[in-house]
Amino acid sequence: MDLPVMPPVQPMLAKAVAGVPDPAKHGGLVFEPKWDGFRCLVFRDGDEVELTSRNTKPLTRYFPEVVEAIKKQLPERCVVDGELFVASVSPDGDRLEFEVLQERIHPAQSRVTMLSETTPAGFVIFDLLALGDESYVDRPLRERRAALEESFSGLEGPCYLTRTTDDPAVAQEWFTTFEGAGLDGVIAKPLDAPYTPNGRTMMKVKHERTADVVVCGYREHKTSTPEQPLLGSLLLGLYADGQLQHVGVSASFTQKRRAELIEELQPLVCDIADHPWSAWAGPESPQAIANPDRVPGTQSRWSAGKDLSFTPLRPERVLEVKYDAMEGRRFRHTAHFKRWRPDRDPESCGYDQLEQPVRYDLASVLSARPSSTTDNARGDTDG
């Protein structure tokens, strides 16, 4: 492989902002949907194709169907930035499925081959680093986007070119409606900015909600010691049909707060036999065998080698957390601690409090003609 931009390359990143930014205050912006998948840089030189992750790790072997699609659909020599995704198909409309995408990372080649056929991935392109013998890294986004539209237009899957708009009103509409297709929010990019590897020159607007959840246990931090115990994460639960379900975790505390929390929670420590999750206690339990990714304290291919044992707590305390979205019955990402809720009864914390986005068909997001100048409030309905 001999390209003007060679791996490893760290992708350009985004910083969080509270709302859709005003283009006039940033010298001009272009907006894109924020995809919820695996960030991926593609390097193609003829029949040689490499896929690399956000942290530059190889992804090529896990997505053979995407490699073949790249050879068929993309220019002979190019380097592009985009997102790998897997979509479910249903009568109610297609939707991104991040958890199904996670299953694609598997050590067994036979499993990789089977999943590439049963849950094939797609790839959506949103930036250009090189084309032919030319590097585009130092060129402004407006030039990179123009080259993308000239050389990558007409892609109809499994590779796609993301749609864009320069109208913040359309971006706000996308922020609301596209969540129903599993998208994560909106990205804003300065039109005059070069491609900046590992630089947070973009802006992201993500969904943020709150929920009252039951604290069911904790895991210790990797730096915890008998002399200085530190909390790593809180295990959270919600009630459904009278049963306390594992809904996710809350983490990201300062060292001082980790020490305070683990001390504060000691009076609630109980034996696993007295805990609502006692049926999940062993790796040979029916629940752990049937669905290990849903059971706290069990291993999966994502956690191999990690100590996932947890300290059970009597489910008597309620915590308010911030979260962005749900993936099935769990928080899609780590929830953020907001405050204790001593005024709430644990049994009152159920799934009915969670906001559900209106369903939206992913195919409509992917099929619309992408353009930084023509996607506006009237033309956005063409999908």
Image (spheres, grey):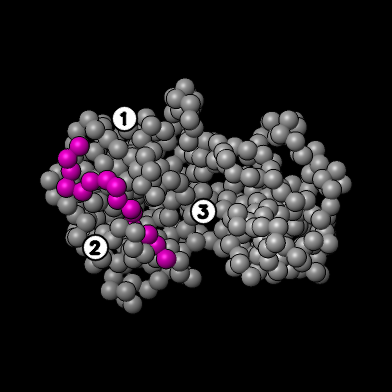
Q: Are marks 1 and 2 in contact (CB under 8 Å)?
A: no
Mark closer to the observer (2, 3): 2
Q: Secondary structure at mark 3?
A: helix
The residue beneath circle 1 is: 68
> The residue under label 2 is which amino acid type?
Pro
The residue under the point 40% across, 71% down is 21
Splitting the image into 4 quarters, where does residue 227 fall? bottom right
User: In the rendered structure, does residue 10 fall within the stretch colored magenta?
Assistant: yes
The first of marks 1 and 2 along the sequence is 1
Question: x and y percent of residue 29 in the render?
Answer: 31, 67
Q: Which residues are magenta?
A: 1-15
The residue indicated by pointer 3 is 179
Residue 173: image tag: none
Within 10 Å of disc 1 (Cα), the crowding (few <14, some 14-19, many 20+) is few
Residue 145: x and y, percent? Answer: 24, 55
Q: Is residue 231 left or right of residue 166?
A: right
For disc 2, the marked residue is 194
Residue 362 on image: x %, y %: 46, 44
Q: Amino acid at mark 1?
A: Glu
The kind of residue tagged 3 is Glu
Precedes in sequence: disc 1 or disc 3:
1
Q: Is residue 287 above or below residue 307?
A: above
Q: Is residue 27 magenta?
A: no
Mark 2 and mark 3 lie on one chain; the one further toward the N terminus is 3
**Closer to the camera in the image, 266 or 375:** 266
